[in-house]
Image (tube, rainbow, N blue to C red):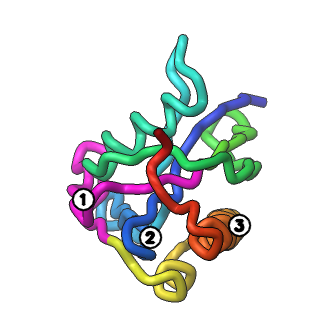
């Protein structure tokens, strides 16, 4: 068994959520949230911010920790047990540019219900629900703003 840790972000700007569309060798992959592997010496927060920036071109600011998702998948020689730590982030604009080297062919900001239905993986839908609830709670309390 191989253990892997990634970090990512639910990035929101003006109520809309940033998604990426991955298409690997013309095989449907689907819409996902930005995330990636922790590099040596990085904190989970640093990884989440770096991966969002690399994969989408968006500048995010962490608002708060959302939680983690866990899943496993098979690779030819083993099974990978993956843990992903997620952060609620605020973007500074609607700008995004998908990272072609990672097979992302499209990106954009979507309304919550659109994003929820576009997302391919159930665990990312669950994280989106949790993050969006945190976002709406902060917004209602007048606390949705960049940390000082």
Residue at 22% across / 50% down in the picture? 100
Corner quadrant of residue 78: top right
Q: Which residue is mark 3?
A: 130
Residue at 44% across / 83% down in the picture? 111
- Residue closer to the observer: 142 or 127: 142
Secondary structure beneath dot 3 equals: helix
Magenta range is 87-108
**Other-residue count near label 3 (Cα within 10 Å), few / some / many at <14 / 14–19 / ≥20:** some
Q: Position of residue 72 (x, y in %)?
A: 74, 48
Residue at 47% across / 39% down in the picture? 148
Residue at 70% across / 38% down in the picture? 80
Corner quadrant of residue 13: bottom left
Corner quadrant of residue 24: bottom left
Secondary structure beneath dot 1 equals: loop
Whole-number angstrom distance, CA of label 3 to CA of label 1: 23 Å
Secondary structure beneath dot 2 equals: strand
Q: Position of residue 54 (x, y in %)?
A: 31, 40
- Residue closer to the observer: 27 or 20: 20
- First in sequence: mark 3 vs mark 1: 1
**Other-residue count near label 2 (Cα within 10 Å), few / some / many at <14 / 14–19 / ≥20:** many
Q: Which residue is mark 2?
A: 17
Which mark, by number, is residue 96? 1
**Other-residue count near label 1 (Cα within 10 Å), few / some / many at <14 / 14–19 / ≥20:** many
Magenta-colored stretch includes residue 43: no
Residue 125 seen anywhere in this rendered image of the structure: no
The reply to whether dot 3 and dot 1 touch (C-beta < 8 Å) is no
Whole-number angstrom distance, CA of label 3 to CA of label 2: 13 Å
Residue 107 seen anywhere in this rendered image of the structure: yes
Magenta-colored stretch includes residue 94: yes
């Amino acid at each position: 068994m191989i253990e892997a840790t990634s970090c990512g972000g639910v990035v929101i700007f003006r109520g809309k959520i940033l998604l990426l569309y991955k298409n690997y060798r013309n095989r449907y992959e689907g819409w996902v949230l930005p995330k990636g592997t922790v590099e040596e010496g990085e904190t989970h927060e640093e990884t989440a911010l770096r991966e969002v920036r690399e994969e989408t071109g968006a500048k995010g600011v962490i608002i708060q920790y959302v939680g983690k998702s866990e899943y496993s998948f098979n690779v030819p020689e083993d099974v990978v047990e993956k843990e992903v730590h997620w952060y609620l982030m605020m973007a500074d604009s609607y700008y995004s540019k998908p990272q072609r080297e990672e097979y992302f062919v499209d990106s954009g900001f979507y309304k919550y219900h659109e994003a929820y239905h576009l997302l391919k993986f159930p665990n990312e839908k669950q994280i989106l629900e949790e993050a969006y609830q945190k976002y709406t709670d902060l917004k209602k309390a007048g606390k949705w703003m960049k940390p000082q």
